[in-house]
Image (spheres, grey):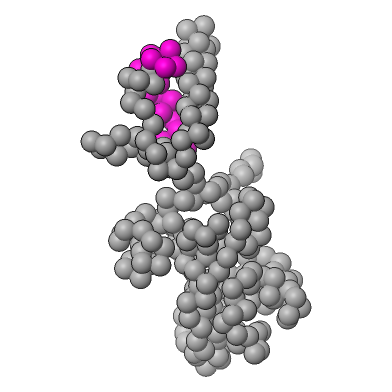
């Protein structure tokens, strides 16, 4: 690498770190100084500073608002593709997880859900819709579909914690494997209201089917995660 390119990248990384330190002092929702002011304060060129700001915006630390300025943004949560519950994942990040059960109903599985859950269409299932929160902030809205025979006597209040913990501690059932798909989507009216975001906001649709060690299907769940608070990380290895 040429010396000039190395120097440019070093200046950009230094500027990025300095702006990160500024972000921590300002707090979420506050505007950072103008590019002209920052360029003078940090003794870097406007071009180098803009590149550092672009990188921080891509990483979710800043958001630019046309005609208004650049503001500190709530950082996105990196979601790794592993078999962990939402509650476990949030605790590992030092955040306090919470769940609010929005509805619980029992119905016949029908053809589609019966196929996902590998049960007869005439078998009863439990359908639970709940809001997932971290540190009091709405993160996702999810709908669980569970064979009723798996969770006899379950009540709505019991879904206000980790469902996987509930399966382990009350029913002696443990998740062993899962298949999950992810695709981009936008929020509808109900999801937007629950998550506190504008209609048609970017989101991720997660669909997961989980099984126990005997390959018995335990759940089919679809979740809408806020696109402004999540990014997906996967570990890749050569074939």
* Image vertical order of residue 20 relative to residue 123, above or below: above
Please state which of residues 209 and 195 is positioned toward the viewer in this rendering. 195
Residue drawn where x is 55% and y is 47% of the image: 78
* Image vertical order of residue 152 relative to residue 83, above or below: below
Query: Where does the image place residue 81, in percent across and percent down from the top left?
Result: 59, 53
Please state which of residues 96 and 214 is positioned toward the viewer in this rendering. 96
Query: Where does the image place residue 98, in percent across and percent down from the top left?
Result: 57, 65
Q: How many marks?
A: 0
Q: Is residue 121 visible in this depiction of the protein?
A: no
The quadrant where residue 85 appears: bottom right
Start and end of the magenta stretch? 40-61
Please state which of residues 67 and 57 is positioned toward the viewer in this rendering. 67
Which quarter shows the C terminus?
A: top right
Q: Is residue 224 visible in this depiction of the protein?
A: yes
Please state which of residues 223 and 41 is positioned toward the viewer in this rendering. 41
Q: Is residue 55 magenta?
A: yes
Query: Where does the image place residue 204, in percent across and percent down from the top left?
Result: 44, 57
Residue drawn where x is 35% and y is 17% of the image: 46
* Image vertical order of residue 169 relative to residue 5, above or below: below
Q: Residue furthest top?
A: 3
Q: Is residue 192 magenta?
A: no
* Image vertical order of residue 169 relative to residue 58, above or below: below
Main SS of the magenta segment?
helix
Query: Where does the image place residue 177, in percent across and percent down from the top left?
Result: 67, 65
The quadrant where residue 235 appears: top right
Q: Is residue 155 left or right of residue 225?
A: right
Q: Residue furthest bottom?
A: 122
Q: Residue furthest left?
A: 67
Residue drawn where x is 64% and y is 90% of the image: 153
């Amino acid at each position: 690498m040429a010396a000039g390119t190395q120097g440019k990248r070093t200046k950009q990384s230094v500027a990025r770190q300095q702006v990160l330190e500024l972000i921590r002092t300002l707090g979420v929702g506050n505007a950072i100084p103008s590019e002209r002011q920052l360029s003078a304060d940090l003794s870097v060129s406007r071009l180098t500073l803009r590149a550092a700001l672009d990188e921080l915006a891509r990483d979710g630390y800043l958001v630019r608002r046309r005609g208004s300025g650049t503001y500190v943004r709530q950082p996105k949560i990196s979601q790794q593709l592993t078999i962990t519950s939402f509650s476990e994942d949030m605790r590992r990040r030092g955040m306090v997880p919470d769940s609010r059960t929005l509805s619980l109903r029992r119905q016949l599985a029908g053809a589609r859900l019966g196929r996902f859950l590998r049960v007869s269409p005439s078998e009863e299932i439990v359908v639970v819709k709940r809001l997932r929160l971290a540190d009091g902030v709405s993160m996702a809205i999810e709908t669980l579909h569970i064979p009723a025979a798996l969770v006899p006597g379950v009540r709505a209040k019991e879904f206000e914690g980790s469902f996987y913990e509930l399966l382990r501690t009350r029913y002696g059932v443990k998740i062993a494997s899962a298949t999950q798909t992810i695709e981009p989507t936008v929020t509808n009216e109900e999801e937007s209201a629950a998550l506190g975001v504008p209609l048609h906001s970017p989101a991720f649709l997660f669909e997961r089917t989980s099984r126990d060690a005997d390959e018995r299907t335990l759940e089919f769940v679809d979740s809408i995660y806020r696109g402004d608070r999540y990014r997906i990380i996967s570990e890749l290895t050569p074939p």
